[in-house]
Structures are given as C-alpha cells and as structure tokens.
Image: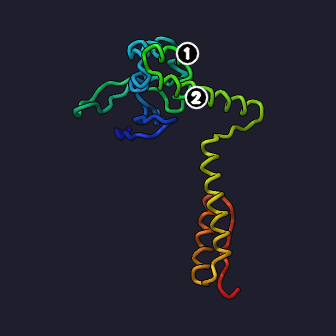
Amino acid sequence: MSKVTFSIQYAGLELQVTRNASGEDVVPLKPLADTFGLDWERQRVKVTASPYLNEYLGTCTRHMPGAGGQIREQTCILLSRVAAYLMSINPDRVKAQGNEDGAKFLIAKQNEWADALHDYEELGVAVNLNHHRVQGAKVNALIRAVALRGKTENQTDRTLMGHLVARLASDIGLPYQPELPGV
C-alpha cells in the first residue's frame, strides 16, 4: 500500500489525500471539522459510533504525516463522501461558533449540491455552473481568435492563428483543421 499523500482543492478546501487499505482515496476528518470550528472529538464519534455513517462515509484510520514530521493516527473518510459529510453539518452550529464565513460557504455548497442532485434525479443530468463558466470563457476566447484570424492579412500570422484556433477548439472538444497555405 502506498504511503504517498497529496493535497487537492475540493469545493474551495485544500484536502490531504491518501489511500485506504482498499486503494480508495481518503481524507482526514479532523481538518474538515477544524475548518468549520466544530468539536473534533464530537465529529469523530459522530462518524465512527454510527454503523451506518461509519460504512457510508468509508471511515478508516490511517497513519499520516503531521506537524514536525510526526506520524499521527487520523480518522479518515472517503474522498467521494466529503460532500455527504459536509451536507451533514448544520451551518447554524458553525455560525454559533463564530465562523460566519464557514457558515456562508456551507450554505452555498449545500444549496449547490442539493440543486445538482435534484437536477440529476429530475433531468438525468446535472451541470456544474462553475465548470460551465470556464467552458464559456474558452468558447469566447475561440470566437475572438477566429475573428482575429479573419482580420489577419499576413499569411504566416494567419497560419499561426489557425493553429491557435485549432488548439482552442480542441480544448473544448470541437474538431477543427487550420487552413493550410495554398489550399
């Protein structure tokens, strides 16, 4: 089993990821609880004492690097269940701990995820608007590049712009062949 850990950005949070005994990605629970000002021991008991939550969240114990190079035993949950865990946190409790920003973050994420789940159940598909915005920016860049290419008189520059347009089109999954000189 790999001892490698790495960090990822997940829903605006940085999470340290490692693998459990089954090879699945897991993250330590304590930093999540700490982020929202929740009592760590209470959260640990919440996920380990309940047979349902224990299995559903894929709770396990891992030895992970801590401060000062120490190896610490950490209660972890499946990376694929982080959203489910965050959905179980009451933003009012977070706000009561003085973490207004954390409460606002949770409310926004819980609403986003609830809407996505509703769309998936009702429509069979859910669209992450944050990904859509990135895709929209790429489409706009492609449109601008095509327009600029059309205004470029120098054939070398036009060819270069054609390759740029092809790359931008490829980035958003559109087939495009640049105009070849003399064709």
Q: Secondary structure at mark 2?
A: helix
Residue 124, image x, y percentages: 75, 36
From the image, state whether disc 2 or disc 1 is nearer to you. 2
Q: Residue at x 60, y 84 (%)?
A: 154
Q: Secondary structure at mark 1?
A: helix
Relative depth, front residue between 104 and 29: 104
Return the disc, 2 or 1, that comes first in the chain's sequence.
1
Name which quarter of the figure residue 20 lies in: top left
What residue sits right under mark 2 in the picture?
Answer: 108
Residue 16, image x, y percentages: 40, 35
Name which quarter of the figure residue 18 lies in: top left
Q: Between marks 2 and 1, how big is the CA–CA gap? A: 26 Å
Residue 117, image x, y percentages: 68, 30
Left/right of residue 71 with respect to residue 36 in the rendered view: left
Relative depth, front residue between 45 and 61: 45
Looking at the image, which residue sits at the far right? Answer: 123
For the N terminus, give its image quadrant. top left
Mark 1 crowdedness (10 Å alpha carbons): few <14, some 14-19, many ≥20: few
What residue sits right under mark 1 in the picture?
Answer: 52
Compared to residue 8, the image places residue 35 above or below, namely above
What count of labels does the image hold? 2
Q: Residue at x 65, y 52 (%)?
A: 136
Q: Residue at x 32, y 24 (%)?
A: 73
Compared to residue 144, the image places residue 106 above or below, namely above
> The disc labelled 2 sits on which kind of residue?
Ala
Name which quarter of the figure residue 125 lies in: top right
For the C terminus, give its image quadrant. bottom right
> The disc labelled 1 sits on which kind of residue?
Tyr
Looking at the image, which residue sits at the far left? Answer: 68
